[in-house]
């Protein structure tokens, strides 16, 4: 009696995993802009010049300078990752293989014919590759703030993709900027 529920429940559980996979693939190209603030003992001009040099070395270009709001905007192109595209394709291949295995056991008359589902696995890598390359903006705001000592400190506010902020942190620490 219990044996008759094994295959349908396995199919149901395998099928339930598919929406998670699709949301994971879609989330791989989602915008993840964050804001981070750092303090530096250096002057506004020195911090801005060093961060500008860093961003220029990373292929960003200056697109706007708003002196009233003391905000600078840089733009660069984010390139897709071949490793991530391959990973997503492999993940989709594994998922479609599992689904085709469960379907071939559930419906033995079709059998191995369900493995044709695996041909859709490159769609995941293609989707990522098409959507991941996009312009990315980094907005910087530099302002002086009074400190507990007589010196003033510079507050650097960075609004950018979280991966760019993570990559920027080691450079800013070298510049004497702390979170």
Image (cartoon, rainbow, N blue to C red):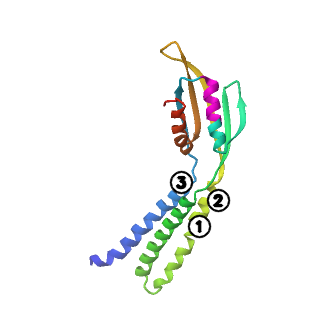
Q: Is residue 99 left or right of residue 123?
A: left
Name the residue carrying label 2: 130
Q: Nearer the viewer, residue 153 or 73?
A: 153
Q: What residue do we see at 63% from left, 40% from top?
A: 55
| CB within 8 Å, label 1 to label 3 | no
State the separation of the CA atoms marked 1 and 3: 15 Å
Q: Quadrant of the N terminus?
A: bottom left
Name the residue carrying label 3: 27
Q: Which mark is residue 123?
A: 1
Classify mark 2: helix, strand or loop.
helix
Classify mark 3: helix, strand or loop.
helix
Of labels 3 and 2, the one closer to you: 2
Q: What residue do we see at 37% from left, 71% from top?
A: 10
Residue count near mark 1 (Cα–Cα under 10 Å), binned few <14, some 14–19, many ≥20: some
Helix, strand or loop for the magenta stretch, by majority: helix
Q: Position of residue 110 (x, y in %)?
A: 48, 85
Q: Is residue 163 left or right of residue 104?
A: right
User: Closer to the N terminus: mark 1 or mark 3?
Assistant: 3
Using the image, determine if residue 95 lies above or below residue 79.
below
Q: Which residues are magenta?
A: 43-52
Query: Which of the 4 image quarters holds residue 162?
Result: top right
Using the image, determine if residue 34 lies above or below residue 21.
above
Instruction: Tell me how many marks there are.
Output: 3
State the separation of the CA atoms marked 3 and 2: 14 Å
Q: Position of residue 25 (x, y in %)?
A: 53, 59
Q: Position of residue 44 (x, y in %)?
A: 62, 24
State the separation of the CA atoms marked 1 and 2: 10 Å
Q: Position of residue 147 (x, y in %)?
A: 51, 17
Query: Which of the 4 image quarters holds residue 54?
Result: top right
Residue count near mark 2 (Cα–Cα under 10 Å), binned few <14, some 14–19, many ≥20: few
Q: Nearer the viewer, residue 95 or 108?
A: 95
């Amino acid at each position: 009696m219990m044996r008759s529920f094994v295959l349908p429940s396995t199919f149901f559980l395998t099928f339930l995993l598919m929406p998670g996979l699709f949301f994971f693939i879609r989330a791989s190209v989602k915008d993840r802009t964050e804001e981070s603030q750092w303090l530096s003992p250096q002057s506004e001009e020195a911090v801005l010049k060093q961060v500008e040099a860093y961003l220029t070395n990373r292929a960003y270009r200056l697109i706007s300078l708003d002196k009233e709001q003391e905000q600078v905007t840089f733009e660069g192109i984010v390139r897709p990752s071949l490793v991530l595209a391959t990973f997503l394709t492999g993940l989709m291949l594994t998922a479609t293989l599992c689904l085709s295995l469960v379907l071939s056991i559930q419906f033995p008359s079709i059998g191995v014919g369900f493995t044709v589902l695996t041909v859709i696995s490159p769609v995941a890598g293609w989707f990522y590759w098409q959507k991941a390359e996009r312009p990315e903006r980094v907005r910087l705001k530099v302002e002086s703030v009074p400190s507990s000592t007589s010196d003033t400190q510079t507050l650097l506010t960075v609004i950018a993709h979280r991966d760019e902020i993570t990559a920027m942190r080691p450079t800013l620490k070298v510049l004497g900027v702390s979170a």
